[in-house]
Image: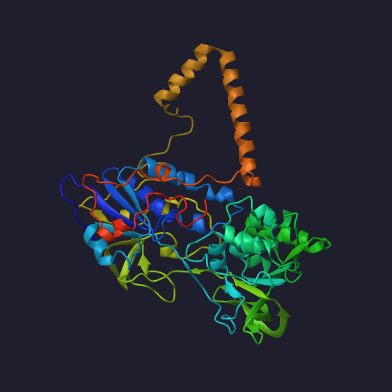
Amino acid sequence: MSLQPPAQGRPWRIAVVGSGPSGFYAVQALHRLRDFPVQVDLFDRLPTPFGLVRGGVAPDHQNIKAVTRSYDRQAARTEGLRFFGNVQVGRDLSVADLESLYDATIWANGHEGARTLGIPGEDLDGVASAAHFVFWYNGHPDHVDRSYPLGRAQKAVVVGNGNVAIDVARILSQDPERLALTDIAQHALDQLRGSAVRSVDVLGRRGPEQASFTPTELAELAELPCLDLRVGADGVAEAHPDEADAAVRKNIELLSRQASREPLDRPRSIRLRFFVSPIAFVGDDQGRLRAVRLARNALVARGGRLSAQPTGEVWEEPCQLALTAIGYRGLQIPGMPFDPQLGRMPSEAGRVLAAPGAAAPGHYVVGWARRGPPAWWAPASPTPKTRWPACGRTTWGGAAPAPRHRCGRAPGRPRRARGQLRRVAPHRRRRAAGRQAAGPGAREADLGGRDARSAGDRARGRSARDGRHAPAPIKAGHLLPPIGDVAGAVEVPPIAHHHLHGHLEGAGFPR
């Protein structure tokens, strides 16, 4: 495929749908194409940006949410970038509108739907998706009106063995007063303060070696002073950590340590169980969840991987709340192809497929919308191979931009040989010459001041992690330059201008 160059003197006009991490990294990759000036409009159906960083990360994980500061800086220094909030494709703009207004559209809309188990009883009062529960306690505008039977539920089960399952189990068992020091939504905090949940079971259909949670999440759970982390003995003793990677070995070590110790006398408990699957949720006469029917599993090699197969042992356990943390699913956008089996847009090498083997002209896809959600998530920058997959395969006006490594070195340029002197930037040479002229005393004073500043930074970091410092509200001036009449800007239909939100503070999300 070849994209025709725009008119003389006009930059490329690119629409990025979705302002989560993948959307910002796509903007970053576009502006690194220095031979091709671009003007990017960033759309989001919510009034505020940052996607799952804002709506999916647990409120007590402020260190992960801090990545939005880099997005703020990126937006402030990126020329030709505009943000259009509360604009939904299919409601305010059509795909045809995007095709007529922009040279290309990048879909970075992620996954907002939740997968279901497909077992009886999922419609009972007390059975819900963990993804929606996460959106609820993070103040997502679509989920603020949800309610959960926390006041009458003494036992909860979480189905899944990933980080989302660990997150919701921790939030259910966490001391509400500690959560009050975070940016959790007020309506969720009010319900959690009246929660009667005292025990949470996290159910995994396979063994501890196949668990998707990270050692960091598991260690954090074990160190909470308000709960007792218990581990079922099934599968932990039979695990073979020597045959696994480093993360799995660390998980097995932590699980074995927890399984071998005596239970602690604490007000709440979380129990990690393996080789069990729910096969039905059982309700009472009022349509409320009262029990979960479980089946014992065994691992069977199938298709090159280990799958869980029922052994025939079935039993019921009482519970009043069940959250299914079995993954996210994409939602179809009107006018765009969608694979219902995979739950996302069909694509190849980052280009949307209108039909098998036929790319949709001018449409690209990145992030979760392209590959689906991973087993565990962190808003890390893409690797060089997936940074911008379509650019190297697209002819931009007859000349494809040369791909570059993450460090900025072109592929054909040789690495610096061992022992070869490194070129020092002029400002670094001037700084070094000034220190040398000032003498060793100035150097020691400079180091002392730097150490003091570093100690202060570390102290502030500990305060933020402890929850003593609430995150500052996002202000429009810190995020993006004012949106106004820009020379050569893309003309957006009036209905989209009607939904522009320049003031982000208090627009639906908590600060």
Above or below: residue 155 compared with residue 349: below
Residue at 65% from the left image edge and 56% from the top image edge = 215
Above or below: residue 445 compared with residue 56: above
Q: Is residue 429 visible?
A: yes
Above or below: residue 258 compared with residue 320: above
Q: How many marks?
A: 0
Above or below: residue 48 compared with residue 316: above
Tell which of 189 and 280 is nearer to you.
189
Residue 323 in the image, given as x and y percentages of width and height: 61, 71
Residue at 60% from the left image edge and 35% from the top image edge = 457
Residue 59 in the image, given as x and y percentages of width and height: 59, 54
Q: Is residue 205 visible?
A: no
Q: Quadrant of residue 247?
A: bottom right
Tell which of 277 and 193 is nearer to you.
193
Tell which of 390 and 485 is nearer to you.
485
Residue 402 in the image, given as x and y percentages of width and height: 31, 47
Q: How is the image coloured?
A: rainbow
Residue 248 is left or right of residue 500, and the answer is: right
Tell which of 301 and 380 is nearer to you.
380
The quarter of the rendered structure image containing the N terminus is bottom left
Q: Quadrant of residue 37?
A: top left
Residue at 53% from the left image edge and 50% from the top image edge = 65
Residue 225 in the image, given as x and y percentages of width and height: 75, 54
Residue 446 is left or right of residue 494, and the answer is: right
Residue 283 is left or right of residue 494, and the answer is: right
